[in-house]
């Protein structure tokens, strides 16, 4: 697993996920281990979900239930490795990074990939978690149709250009402050 494009806090969460799997006597770690680690470590994910008024305790319990049911992957390497679902999620997190316009893959990118319909969980399972990828993207005013550099240009244009760019990006009042807050997380 190549972690050079990951935030320091995500790398710390991955280490904690491995430790949780070791504690559970698993040879691999799964998505549930990773989410619990991201909510435990100082990744900013817990604070973001709280600011979105999501029930973080419930989300944590939901993934803890899946952690208890987890069956690890058998292998001979002697180290704790990510399972196939985690590898898929980390690949999908690259898409979230682009959508959110971040410089590195962070816990929010990974969480958005986890709750993306069909990546790991079904639509019904995601509904039961209580937060969707669309809600996260809307909260951060992320666009799937425009690249991050184009979005930054639109945010930087004078207010007289706002009307022209409004059709290109669903601009909301205060989006500059939410984007600035997101970039500081």
Image (cartoon, grey):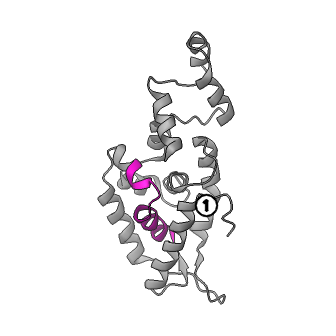
Which of the pair 120/50 is nearer the observer? 50
| Magenta stretch contains residue 182 | no
Left or right: residue 174 versus residue 8 is left
Which of the pair 117/58 is nearer the observer? 58
Which of the pair 56/174 is nearer the observer? 174
- Please provide percent x and percent y for residue 88: 62, 63
- On screen, 148 above or below 121? above
- Please provide percent x and percent y for residue 95: 63, 48
Residue 147 figure quarter: top right
Residue 52 figure quarter: top left
Instruction: Give the residue pinned by disc 1.
Output: 90
- Please provide percent x and percent y for residue 113: 55, 54
Magenta range is 30-48
> Element at badge 1?
helix
Q: Main secondary structure of the magenta part?
A: helix
Residue for point 49% across, 67% down: 34
């Amino acid at each position: 697993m190549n972690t050079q494009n990951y935030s320091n806090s995500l790398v710390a969460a991955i280490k904690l996920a491995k430790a949780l799997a070791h504690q559970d006597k698993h040879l691999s770690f799964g998505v549930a281990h990773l989410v619990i680690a991201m909510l435990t470590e100082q990744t900013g994910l817990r604070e973001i979900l709280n600011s979105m008024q999501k029930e973080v305790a419930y989300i944590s319990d939901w993934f803890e239930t899946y952690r208890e049911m987890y069956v690890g992957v058998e292998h001979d390497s002697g180290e704790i490795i990510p399972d196939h679902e985690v590898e898929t999620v980390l690949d999908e997190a690259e898409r979230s990074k682009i959508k959110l316009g971040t410089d590195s893959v962070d816990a929010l990118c990974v969480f958005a990939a986890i709750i993306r319909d069909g990546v790991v969980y079904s639509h019904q399972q995601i509904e039961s978690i209580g937060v969707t990828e669309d809600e996260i993207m809307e909260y951060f005013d992320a666009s799937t149709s425009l690249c991050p550099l184009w979005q930054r240009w639109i945010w930087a244009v004078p207010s007289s250009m706002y009307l022209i760019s409004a059709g290109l990006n669903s601009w909301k009042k205060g989006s500059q402050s939410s984007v600035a807050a997101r970039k500081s997380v």
